[in-house]
Amino acid sequence: MVSYPLRSNRNGKSTVIKTKADLLAQYDTVFDAGTRCAIKAASIADVWGNWRGFTVAAGIIWWDRILPPSAAKNAEIQPSDLAKYPFGIITVNHSSQADKHCTADAKRLDQ
């Protein structure tokens, strides 16, 4: 469910994850606790999109359809074809706000 290359942005620095093996090696850095918490906490009402794709949690994660280069290049995609193409994560944007929010939620749930 990832579209490679995957971009991971943290503290103004962008890292490009080129392969599944690269992602698995860096998984806990890319999908840190705050990011995972924000994704888990998101509801369907939190999803919105624009020309870049779809997102939740103020842009912490972006995804869009994974189109084969031949289909995208030829612009031969019809609305009825969209079921053939899966969604894939394209960007993960780390946020200290997500970490703070999830830490506060976790503490509240522990009480």
Image: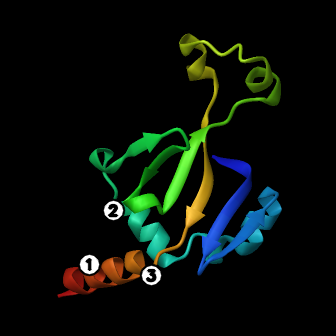
Which residue is at 74% across, 25% downward?
72
Residue at which label 2 appears: 41
**Mark positioned earlier in the residue sequence (3 or 1):** 3
- Report the front residue among 70 and 33: 70
Q: Secondary structure at mark 3?
A: helix
**Quadrant of the rendered image containing residue 23:** bottom right
Residue at which label 1 appears: 105
Q: CA distance from mark 2 to mark 1?
A: 10 Å
On the image, the x and y values in percent for residue 57 come to: 38, 61
Q: Nearer the viewer, mark 2 or mark 3?
A: 3
Which residue is at 65% across, 67% downward?
8
Q: Secondary structure at mark 1?
A: helix
Q: Nearer the viewer, mark 3 or mark 1?
A: 3
The crowd level at tag 1 (other Cα within 10 Å; few <14, some 14-19, many 20+) is: few
Name the residue type under label 2.
Ala
**Mark positioned earlier in the residue sequence (2 or 3):** 2
Which residue is at 54% across, 76% downward?
32
Q: How is the image coloured?
A: rainbow
Left or right: residue 48 compared with residue 53: left
Position above or below: 99 against 20: below
The answer to whether marks 2 and 1 mark residues whose Cβ atoms lie closer than 8 Å is yes
Q: CA distance from mark 2 to mark 3?
A: 16 Å
Q: CA distance from mark 3 to mark 1?
A: 14 Å
**Quadrant of the rendered image containing residue 22:** bottom right
- Report the front residue among 96 and 87: 96
On the image, the x and y values in percent for residue 95 come to: 47, 75
Left or right: residue 59 compared with residue 107: right
Name the residue type under label 3.
Ser
Q: Secondary structure at mark 2?
A: helix
Residue at which label 3 appears: 96
